[in-house]
Image: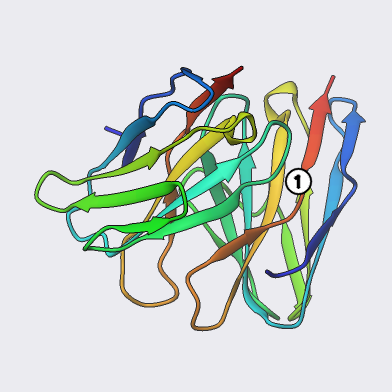
Amino acid sequence: RKEVEQDPGPFNVPEGATVAFNCTYSNSASQSFFWYRQDCRKEPKLLMSVYSSGNEDGRFTAQLNRASQYISLLIRDSKLSDSATYLCVVKGTTDSWGKFQFGAGTQVVVTP
Amino acid sequence: SAVISQKPSRDICQRGTSLTIQCQVDSQVTMMFWYRQQPGQSLTLIATANQGSEATYESGFVIDKFPISRPNLTFSTLTVSNMSPEDSSIYLCSGRRDGQETQYFGPGTRLLVL
């Protein structure tokens, strides 16, 4: 079983609509969670960290469910520029040296 | 955000040859990593580049195939040795600042082995 699993998609979303997707992780001791965004042929870039109580950053909302070991990302009012692959990232330990585990990514395609 | 540069940005190589990828980070980055990303796949950590000592390799990666150097805090190289077509991939340098969890990535090196 992969340590971090994501639905690869693609999620085809009309512009202005809402899209949400999850990521599951296998290590119950995981401490830190992130969503990264990767545009086609570009490097991954941090989108947002995921906090235990859930958090928002503009149109993006991230949530963590420790009991079921998944995190989610919701994008409201989708823009064409939101088209990208969203990578779920999990860090296993509390110290800064912990290794990051990356999911394979969920592709989102926002259409006009 | 941290500034991370890599070169070359892409290369096409013949089977059996070796390619060295260079990575330069800004002075605030303390941890450096090398990843591989194959098409449609997740990022796979190759190794952590340790300043002035041997890199720490992940399972499935060995020093003879992927020698890594980090002679100082801000510079590292990854060599892909004795290449085969299976080594065709994107190789990404990554860095983290001390005490921070955000990980930054270089633009990647696209390698095609014929």
Residue A49: x, y in percent?
A: 41, 60
Residue at the farthest left position: A67
Q: Amino acid at mark 1?
A: Gly
Classify residue B96 as left or right of residue B71: left
Which image quadrant for residue B3? bottom right
Classify residue A77 as left or right of residue B77: left
Classify residue A33 as left or right of residue B17: left
Is any part of residue B82 visible from this angle? no
CA neighbours of label 1 inside 10 A, class few (<14), some (14 to 19), many (20+): many
Residue B23: x, y in percent?
A: 80, 61
Which image quadrant for residue A57? bottom left
Q: Residue at x 70, y 81 (%)?
A: B52
Q: Residue at x 53, y 43 (%)?
A: B44
Compared to residue A89, the image places residue A86 above or below, namely above
Residue on which disc 1 sits: B108
The chain ID associated with circle 1 is B
